Image: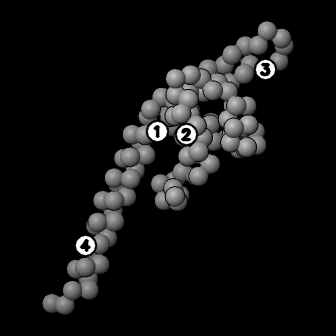
Amino acid sequence: MDLKILGISDTEFEILRLLFRKRHRFVSLREIESELFLRQPVVSLLTKKMREAGWVDQKEVRRKDRGRPQVMIKWNGKAKDHLLNLVRSKISEMKELEEYIAETFTPK
């Protein structure tokens, strides 16, 4: 399905689907990379976009050893409402366009 009309990539949608399936727990970015066969930069960029949009919750888990904390994200349900509102908006725009074309090409 082509989701570009909504401003969301297929990869971003796949990440959201994975998070929805695992919605009862936090998921590491590494887990997303391995399950969806994606590279780290892609996952980091798209999950950052999702965090900024408010679609996912994030926490950082400190490891016992040194190093950077592990970033974990979790589905929070806001993406569904946002995407459905975008679809409804596009449907409304298409209906207006349909009416405009029908009026334009109707003989008077």
Residue 99 numbered mark, or none: 4
Q: Are marks 2 and 3 in contact (CB under 8 Å)?
A: no
Which is nearer the N-term, disc 2 or disc 4? 2
Q: Residue at x 52, y 58 (%)?
A: 1
Q: Please identify, in this view, whether the residue under mark 2 or under mark 3 is nearer the observer.
A: 2
Q: Position of residue 15 (x, y in %)?
A: 60, 40
Residue 19 placement: quadrant: top right
Marked residue nearer the N-terminal end (1 or 3): 3
SS at circle 2: helix
Disc 2 crowd rating (10 Å Cα; few below 14, some 14-19, many 20+) is: many
How far is mark 3 from mark 4, CA to CA?
56 Å
User: Can you identify the residue that label 3 sits on?
Assistant: 68
Mark with earlier residue (4, 1): 1
Which amino acid type is shown beneath numbered disc 1?
Answer: Ala
> Which disc, if any, is residue 16?
2
Which-is-in-front pick, marks 2 and 4? 2
Reading the image, the residue beneath label 1 is: 79
Which amino acid lies under the numbered mark 3 shown in the image of this protein?
Arg
Badge 2 or badge 3: first in the primary sequence: 2
- In the rendered image, residue 7, in percent from the top left (x then y), is placed at 51, 53
Q: CA distance from mark 2 to mark 3?
A: 25 Å
The amino acid marked with disc number 4 is Glu
